[in-house]
Image (cartoon, rainbow, N blue to C red):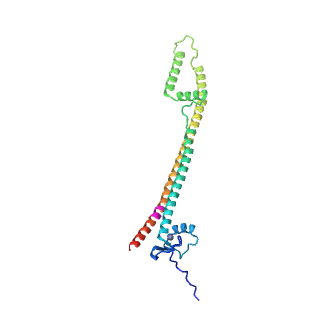
Amino acid sequence: MMPEPPPVSSSCLVCGRPKEPRDLSAASDVRQTLAELIVKDVPDWNESSRICSECLQKYRQLYLTQLLADETGELGELEAEVAQVLSRGALLTPLTAPDDRDESLGFGARMADRVADWGGSWGFILSFVAVLALWMMVNAGGLLVRPFDPYPFILLNLVLSCIAALQAPVIMMSQRRQEAKDRRRAENDYQINLKTELELRQLHEKIDHQLTHQWRRLLEIQRIQVDLLHEMRRARQ
Ligand SMILES: [Zn+2]
């Protein structure tokens, strides 16, 4: 004996009312996304079930409402994340901004900077040459009866050696300070770059979200609209 095929009911499974056959849609004609919603309400929903256009319409509206709610929720989450990262990132810059005003420096460091600045200028070279010339003229030119440093200027030699010996550490101090300043500036640059990278990543996420989620959802909404159009045409025929 052949097993009987499951009887094709002529009533809507969802509301249970008998309907005209042309007013019913087969389960195979219902979109997967809508079928998932129907199964939640009507666990008996299967391949041979039928649904009236009224109930189908109800589920379409439910689906669209949920879609919009999901969309708003996801956008809200994304916005919150961006805001959080930016508020965290906004603190990065002021925390480590390099202070070029040197207010935090001690007296010695400031002196070293100033001496090194002056020692590397034309003003220093010219005045140094002038002092040397004056010294030699005074001692060798016969201006004084008893010169305090006669030729070959041994005292001048000693003074020059002392200046050279002091200048080296002063320059080194100033260089070390400059290095620290450069390092702070580099760290600051790094943090700004990091912040930019974070912001870029957020932008990427936003665009990806639009490309994948929103685009797909728009297409799904359009499919439902096309279904509706078909249904309207069928009803008019
Ligand atoms: Zn129904």
Picture quarter with the N terminus: bottom right
Q: Position of residue 169 (x, y in %)?
A: 61, 30
Q: Residue at x 47, y 68 (%)?
A: 54
Quick one: which residue is furthest to the bottom in this view? 1
Locate residue 214 relative to residue 187 in the image: left or right: left
Q: Give, as a single range, the part of the protein colored magenta.
A: 217-221
Q: Position of residue 230 (x, y in %)?
A: 42, 70
Picture quarter with the C terminus: bottom left
Q: Residue at x 55, y 41 (%)?
A: 93
Query: Which is nearer the eye, 153 or 80?
Result: 80
Query: Which is nearer the eye, 105 or 30?
Result: 30
Q: Position of residue 20 (x, y in %)?
A: 46, 76
Locate residue 215 relative to residue 182 in the image: left or right: left
Image quadrant where residue 36 sits: bottom right
Q: Residue at x 54, y 18 (%)?
A: 135
Quick one: which residue is furthest to the front in this view? 17
Q: Is residue 23 above or below residue 114?
A: below
Q: Is residue 126 magenta?
A: no
Q: Is residue 111 above or below residue 218?
A: above
Query: Which is nearer the eye, 136 or 26?
Result: 26
The reply to whether residue 186 is in sight is no
Query: Which is nearer the eye, 189 or 89?
Result: 89
Q: Is residue 218 magenta?
A: yes
